[in-house]
Amino acid sequence: MTPKQRERFIGTCEDLESLPPKQFYYGAYAGLDWGGKQDLSCGTAACALGRGIAKYGRSARVKFSRFTSSSLPMPTPYGVEYPDEVEVARRLYGDEAAREFGFLFLPECGNRLKSNANATQVAKHLRRWLAKLEAK
């Protein structure tokens, strides 16, 4: 993880810790009510990775894309024609986060967090992972 990626990771945790509950949902990158705004200023709920895209997407060259009119917005790297959540995690937060993508960003994927986990619980989960990574 580069210093820039670490800064983004910590920034995402800090954002989660101060986020109003209605704007967080661990079970989706962004909600069906997403209005097309990359910064999520439409007020839709989003997960930790979605919040990272909203804040750091431009500098990491990632964005939300909707591939059919009824589908949820999906994380998509610039220059790629299909969603690739793992590559988005890599660009935002580095190789280590990409390798641990499911554990970090998906409910009940090797972690104890359910889709109804709140933003503070997810931030704590992410911070614990970072502390273990840095202790190596």
Image: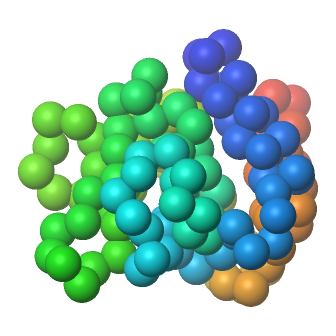
Front residue of 126 and 64: 64
Number of on-image labels: 0
In the rendered image of this protein, does residue 134 appear above or below residue 25? above
Q: Is residue 68 left or right of residue 115?
A: left
Q: Is residue 107 visible?
A: no
**Residue appearing at x 27%, y 80% in the figure:** 71
**Residue appearing at x 87%, y 30% in the figure:** 135
Q: Which image quarter holds the N terminus?
A: top right
Expressed as whole percent of the image width and height from the top left, the position of residue 80 reads 15, 43
- Residue sitting at the far top: 3
**Residue appearing at x 55%, y 52% in the figure:** 41
**Residue appearing at x 45%, y 35% in the figure:** 57
Q: How is the image coloured?
A: rainbow
Expressed as whole percent of the image width and height from the top left, the position of residue 34 reads 43, 68
Q: Is residue 30 left or right of residue 79?
A: right
Indicate the quadrant where residue 67 lies: bottom left
Q: Is residue 20 visible?
A: yes
Q: Is residue 83 left or right of residue 4?
A: left
- Residue sitting at the far left: 81
In the rendered image of this protein, does residue 5 appear above or below residue 102? above
Front residue of 19 and 35: 35
Q: Which image quarter holds the C terminus?
A: top right
Q: Is residue 1 left or right of residue 11?
A: left
Expressed as whole percent of the image width and height from the top left, the position of residue 46 reads 59, 66
Front residue of 77 and 22: 22
Expressed as whole percent of the image width and height from the top left, the position of residue 116 reads 74, 85
